[in-house]
């Protein structure tokens, strides 16, 4: 039986996520029966509530810290990035109380096994951190990942994949696939694995399942992508009004990242015979599982989220798109101070629990 496509644009706070396995049989948010696989849907933008004072202050802080930093980098991208500096500084950000974590060694990178309070060992989220493929790591994301573990009642394997400029994005995808194979070898069945990531990690959250399908392996139960990058070509992003209003990324940073990625890919194709890489928006998405996407309405990567949602729907993949009004890039990481971040992580938990098809106890 063919899958139906459900593309929902959910207003934050407007109710919990539907179960992915039953949503296809209900009316869509557009007021009609969800279309059959391969039939494109129309994204309808709903009115969203305003941003809290806390999120406005965080956005302002990012605009005078992170944005100038990326601006400087865009002029010196050939020099790379002090990769370990940010992750080392994040040592001061502990996981939430009651979390257990231990190191895991994969074939070409490190990883970390995280179990937040209430997490079980039956289900696991493979998490790929953001950081523009340049920075961040296990420590920067440990607190948010431990929250996701707790609300989803799942264990998490967080992957410290290889970064630019010393490695390629294809290397990072390979690390994600290795992590997935490690889970399969550890006894997890594919239906008990979900892949998630934010920003650059959101790109990988699509690319890893695509690579898994290409390898003939069983795919994961679902995907969660937070403010994902889904297209390296900067044209759409620079043409969108958000390119002038994003509190995280200046306009110059997007083409600078694309040029760096292209340069590393060209070197790898010449020296290692690496095959050309296809971005998620241009891939065969019919092989992907139900997907949740969360993005801020005014961030640089909003066009990427909207485009991948439309193409997932056209491919017949159940997709939920949540657009959060005026929230900064990957606002979920600021859940300690931004109430919308806390609410968004609760939505993530509900989606993941529904992906397992199990009636697990909701966690607030």
Image: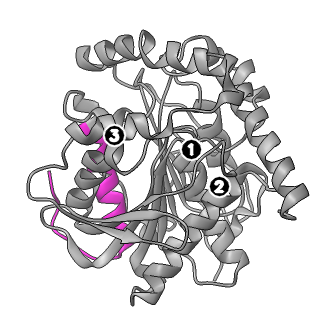
* Closer to the camera in the image, 252 or 8: 252
Would you say residue 355 sits in the magenta stretch?
Answer: yes
Residue mark closest to the camera, 3 vs 1: 3
Would you say residue 182 sits in the magenta stretch?
Answer: no
**Distance between the Cα atoms at labels 3 and 1?**
19 Å
Residue 87's quadrant in the figure? top left
In screen coordinates, is 47 left or right of 17?
right
Residue 363: in sight, yes or no?
Answer: yes
Residue mark closest to the camera, 3 vs 2: 3
**Residue that numbered label 1 is attached to:** 200
Other residues around mark 2 within 10 Å, as few (<14) / some (14–19) / many (≥20): many
**Residue that numbered label 2 is attached to:** 313
How is this picture coloured? Answer: one colour
In this rendering, the answer to whether 97 lies above or below 124 is: above
Under circle 2, the secondary element is: helix
Task: Tell which circle, 3 or 1, labels the residue nearer the N-terminal end.
Answer: 3
**Residue that numbered label 3 is attached to:** 88
Residue stretch in magenta: 342-364
Residue 304's quadrant in the figure? top right
Q: Residue at x 81, y 40 (%)?
A: 263
**Distance between the Cα atoms at labels 2 and 1?**
22 Å
Other residues around mark 1 within 10 Å, as few (<14) / some (14–19) / many (≥20): many
Secondary structure mostly taken by the magenta-highlighted segment of the chain: helix
Residue 252 horizontal/vertical position (percent): 69, 17
């Amino acid at each position: 039986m063919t899958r139906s496509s459900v593309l929902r644009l959910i207003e934050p706070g407007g109710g919990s996520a539907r179960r992915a396995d039953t949503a296809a049989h209900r009316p869509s948010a557009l007021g009609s029966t969800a279309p059959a696989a391969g039939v494109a849907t129309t994204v309808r933008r709903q009115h969203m509530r305003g941003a809290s004072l806390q999120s406005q202050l965080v956005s302002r802080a990012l605009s005078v810290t992170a944005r100038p930093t990326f601006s400087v980098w865009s002029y010196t991208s050939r020099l790379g990035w002090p990769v370990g500096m940010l992750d080392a500084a994040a040592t001061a950000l502990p996981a939430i109380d009651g979390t257990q974590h231990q190191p895991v060694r994969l074939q070409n990178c490190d990883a970390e096994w995280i179990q937040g309070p209430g997490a079980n060992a039956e289900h696991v989220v493979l998490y790929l951190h953001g950081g523009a493929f340049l920075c961040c790591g296990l420590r920067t994301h440990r607190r948010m990942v431990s929250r996701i573990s707790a609300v989803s009642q799942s264990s998490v394997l967080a992957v410290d994949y290889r970064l630019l400029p010393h490695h390629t994005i294809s290397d990072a995808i390979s690390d994600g696939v290795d992590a997935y194979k490690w889970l399969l070898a550890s006894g997890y069945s594919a239906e008990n694995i979900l892949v998630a990531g934010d920003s650059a990690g959101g790109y990988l959250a699509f690319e890893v399942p695509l690579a898994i399908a290409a390898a003939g392996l069983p795919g994961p139960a679902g995907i969660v992508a937070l403010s994902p990058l889904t297209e390296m070509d900067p044209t759409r992003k620079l043409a969108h009004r958000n390119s002038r209003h994003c509190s995280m990324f200046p306009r110059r940073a997007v083409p600078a990242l694309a040029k760096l990625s292209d340069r590393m890919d060209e070197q790898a194709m010449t020296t290692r015979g690496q095959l050309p890489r296809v971005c998620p928006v241009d891939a065969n998405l019919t092989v992907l599982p139900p997907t949740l996407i969360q993005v801020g309405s005014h961030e640089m990567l909003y066009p990427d989220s909207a485009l991948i949602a439309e193409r997932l729907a056209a491919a017949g993949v159940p997709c939920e798109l949540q657009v959060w009004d005026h929230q900064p890039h990957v606002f979920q990481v600021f859940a300690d101070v931004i109430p919308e971040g806390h609410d968004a992580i609760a939505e993530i938990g509900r989606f993941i629990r529904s992906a397992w098809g199990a009636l697990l106890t909701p966690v607030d």
